[in-house]
Image: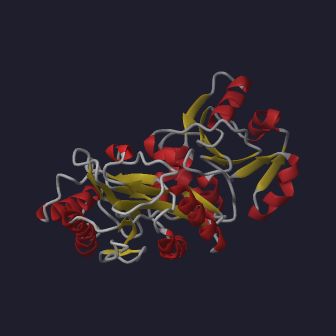
Amino acid sequence: MKSRVRREKLQNILNREKIDCAIYTLGANLQYLLNDQSLVYQRTGYSKMLKGEGYFSGLNLAEYLLVIPAQGEAFLISQPHHQASLEKYGLKIITSFISHFPYYFFQELKAQRIAIGMDAHDSLAQLFKDYDSSLEIIKGETLTDELRVIKDSEEIQLLKKAAAITDQVMAATIPLLIEGSIPVDVEAFIHKKGEALGATDVSFPAACIYTRPGHPSAQERIGYPKQMPLKGNTSIAFDFGFIIEGYCSDFGRSFYRGEPPQKVVDAYGALQKGQIRMLEEIKPFQHKLSDIDRLIRERVTDLGFGEQMLYGDTGICGHQIGIDVHEDPWLINSENDLLRPGMVFCVEPKIWFPGECYMRVEDMVLITETGAESLTVFDRNLYSLD
């Protein structure tokens, strides 16, 4: 059973790190360790996206816990009203009210060094420390990162499905980009169209970014007013994604309403050519994570727009994706691990002309046995909407 294998691999990590057990509640790691894509939980742009920016400590209460000891069988501790819904996992279930979770935990397991995932971390840590102040509580969200970094065939199919729906939503959104349309309406349409196609949530709030030369907001890269009507000579950049059967998508394209200056047309072409070069040349076990930005940036620079491409200092141009929209490792020039088959990244190079135009391209990219495959395939040549 896949879920058992995943938990056993986590137990190997717990033993290696000399941690007595790990505790997870409703969140990405629970979905992964139970292999249940039907789990629904809060993962919005205001919570799960923060994983890539630092450790996010959840404040919500946990109504049931998955406990994975370093030795022995995993078990669940649950409020009584959740028991029936948890029986499908085939694990031992101990029922208790939340206030007595630690009591029944220690009736089952002797542990001193306990790792707790980010979801409800603060409330659980306090609950367990109130029971025994000598406990060592460790942040446990990232313990599964080395397991989740390589996607299996089932996960890849789910990510492909999420990517395909994202492409469909982009195509359906183009007709809305007429003079007078406002970003907030376009974003609402994106959400509703994704819902109609089977999304259970968004990976993060959709962004429809207008940059109109001469408008005060054009001095900030993403400082666009949500109520600013679309007029001629405006660049438009998108960033959105959906949750499909428990897995995320993340995608971006850019367009222009009006007659774009030739340098802007050429810059977008350079961005896409850089992306294509990376897709054609990247190889597993030969290239490092940091090479993804390098391959794109070299091509964009050769075409004359290297200075306008963002993040030249850090080389950041994306992140891994899966159950969470932002998963480790990130694509950054300090990451020297080799690319391996089964990794799925969002690669998102950007160009910024201050006061004039912001553009971005973002594709979900699967590392294969021989190279790379873009899971998002929306038209790379479409830019001017006139």
Q: How many marks?
A: 0
Residue at 60% in and 60% down: 188
308 over 129 or under it: above or below: below
Q: Position of residue 103 (x, y in %)?
A: 79, 33
State which quadrant residue 83 falls in: bottom right
Q: Position of residue 97 (x, y in %)?
A: 85, 39
Q: Is residue 363 visible?
A: yes
- Asked whether, in this view, residue 334 is left or right of residue 172, the answer is left
330 over 257 or under it: above or below: above
177 or 2: which is nearer to us? 177
58 or 106: which is nearer to us? 58
Specify the color scheme.
secondary structure
- Asked whether, in this view, residue 333 is left or right of residue 111, the answer is left
Q: Is residue 206 visible?
A: no
Identify the image quadrant of the N terminus.
bottom right
Q: Position of residue 344 (x, y in %)?
A: 42, 65
Give the farthest residue toward the top.
133
313 over 366 or under it: above or below: above
- Asked whether, in this view, residue 301 is left or right of residue 37, the answer is left
Residue at 48% in and 67% down: 151
Q: Position of residue 40 (x, y in %)?
A: 69, 58
